[in-house]
């Protein structure tokens, strides 16, 4: 398995991974949004590649205050092989390098495997905070 930064040319493969991984669709799931994200400074959009196929992704972003993790996804046929752990180790490394002292991860409670992964990786479910969302058109 190879880990590398995503490029604009990976956008369609990333969307296919998210669909296969059963990630909940979002208004930001588009080729254009992915291409915009990979071009931004202080965003590490990382991919796990096996035999030329995207089998994992994670996006780490630093806003100058906190690190944020988005879209950690592993193809179902590649789960429990260390893909997510390898991606998260690289994502944390990037965030620490930018000066992050705290990292937030958005985790869907309806995905028990994801909840278990984050707990096993040392992240705590901070029940003091709720996420409020407004979709802009």
Image (cartoon, rainbow, N blue to C red):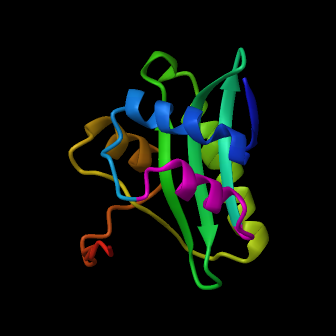
Above/below status of 35 relative to 113: below
Direction from residue 29 to residue 8 in the image, left or right = right
The answer to which of 60 and 128 lies nearer the viewer is: 60
Residue at point 40% right, 27% down?
A: 20
Residue at point 70% right, 67% down?
A: 40
Q: Position of residue 78 (x, y in %)?
A: 52, 19
| Magenta stretch in the rendered image | 28-42
Residue at point 43% right, 58% down?
A: 28
Quarter of the image containing the N terminus?
Answer: top right
Direction from residue 137 to residue 47 in the image, left or right = right
Residue 94 found in image quarter: bottom right
The answer to which of 16 and 78 lies nearer the viewer is: 16
Q: Position of residue 112 (x, y in %)?
A: 26, 39
Above/below status of 9 relative to 65: above
Direction from residue 113 to residue 6 in the image, left or right = right
Residue at point 45% right, 57% down?
A: 123
Q: Is residue 6 visible?
A: no
Quarter of the image containing the C terminus?
Answer: bottom left
Above/below status of 23 relative to 61: above
Question: Residue furthest toward the bottom?
Answer: 65
Direction from residue 30 to residue 44 in the image, left or right = right
> How many circles with numbers are drawn on the protein?
0
The answer to which of 137 and 6 lies nearer the viewer is: 137
Is residue 107 covered in magenta? no
Q: Is residue 25 visible?
A: yes
Q: Position of residue 53 (x, y in %)?
A: 65, 21
Above/below status of 11 relative to 78: below
Residue 50 found in image quarter: top right
């Amino acid at each position: 398995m190879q880990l590398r930064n995503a490029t604009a040319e990976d956008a369609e493969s990333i969307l296919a991974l998210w669909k296969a991984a059963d990630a909940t669709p979002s208004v930001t799931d588009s080729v254009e949004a992915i291409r915009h994200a990979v071009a931004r400074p202080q965003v590490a959009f990382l991919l796990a590649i096996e035999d030329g196929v995207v089998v994992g992704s994670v996006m780490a972003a630093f806003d100058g205050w906190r690190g944020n993790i988005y879209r950690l996804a592993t193809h179902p046929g590649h789960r429990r092989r260390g893909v997510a752990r390898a991606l998260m180790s690289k994502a944390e490394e990037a965030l620490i390098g930018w000066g992050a002292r705290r990292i937030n991860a958005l985790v869907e409670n309806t995905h028990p495997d994801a909840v278990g992964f984050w707990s096993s990786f040392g992240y705590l479910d901070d029940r003091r905070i709720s996420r409020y969302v407004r979709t802009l058109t």
